[in-house]
């Protein structure tokens, strides 16, 4: 079974950039994209218990539900207990980092400005993914 990753980001360019980096790092993985927090919650609800993503990547700053609010939703449901979730955001604010980690984030990564940095961050995120 292929590694499955859910990415939620309201910026289509960031979504595409991260999807490309993930696919380059690990060809054959399956990426599910959500264009915001509400779309991510809806997509998460549609997964069967035995087919949950192996990693959830959330932008912190999204207009409908931000990454922290999505983390709070996930944290309240036991079925996601074993799914690592990370924030991938332009904000490196210590307040945001602490808030995300307090709501169950496994990691917090600031969006990379270079291809090399993106590749490093992508490798760190993939290392957190938990395949069966």
Image (cartoon, rainbow, N blue to C red):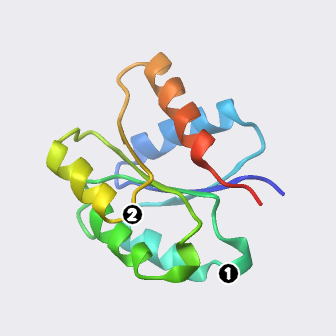
Q: Is residue 122 above or below residue 119?
A: below
Residue 66 visible in the snapshot: no
- Label 1 CA crowd tier, 10 Å (few <14, some 14–19, many 20+): few
Tell which of 81 and 114 is nearer to you: 81
- Residue at (29, 54) in percent of width and height: 60
- Residue at (66, 31) in percent of width and height: 25
CA separation, marks 1 and 2? 19 Å
**Along the horizontal axis of the image, is 10 left or right of 8?**
left
Where is residue 15 shown, x and y percent of the image? 46, 46
The N terminus lies in which quarter of the figure?
bottom right
Where is residue 45 shown, x and y percent of the image? 54, 82
- Secondary element under disc 2, as helix, strand or loop, is loop
Residue 49 disc label: 1
**Residue bearing mark 2:** 104
Where is residue 50 shown, x and y percent of the image? 73, 77
Outermost right residue: 1
Where is residue 66 shown, x and y percent of the image? 27, 63
**Along the horizontal axis of the image, is 49 left or right of 117?**
right
Residue 29 visible in the snapshot: yes
**Along the horizontal axis of the image, is 1 left or right of 70?**
right
Q: Is residue 104 above or below residue 27?
A: below
The C terminus lies in which quarter of the figure?
bottom right
- Judge depth for marks 1 and 2 and give the one in front: 2
- Secondary element under disc 1, as helix, strand or loop, is helix
Q: How many marks?
A: 2
Residue 36 disc label: none
The first of marks 1 and 2 along the sequence is: 1
Q: Within the image, what quadrant is residue 122 found in?
A: top right
**Along the horizontal axis of the image, is 72 left or right of 19?**
left
């Amino acid at each position: 079974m292929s590694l499955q990753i859910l990415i939620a980001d309201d910026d289509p360019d960031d979504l595409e950039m991260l999807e490309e980096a993930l696919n380059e790092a690990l060809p054959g993985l399956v990426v599910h994209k959500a264009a915001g927090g509400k779309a991510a919650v809806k997509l998460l609800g549609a997964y069967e218990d035995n087919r949950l993503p192996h990693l959830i990547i959330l932008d912190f700053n999204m207009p409908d539900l931000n990454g922290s609010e999505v983390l709070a939703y996930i944290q309240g449901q036991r079925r996601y207990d074993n799914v690592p979730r990370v924030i991938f955001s332009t904000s490196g604010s210590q307040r945001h980092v602490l808030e995300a980690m307090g709501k169950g984030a496994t990691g917090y990564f600031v969006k990379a400005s270079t291809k090399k940095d993106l590749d490093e961050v992508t490798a760190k995120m993939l290392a957190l993914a938990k395949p069966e």
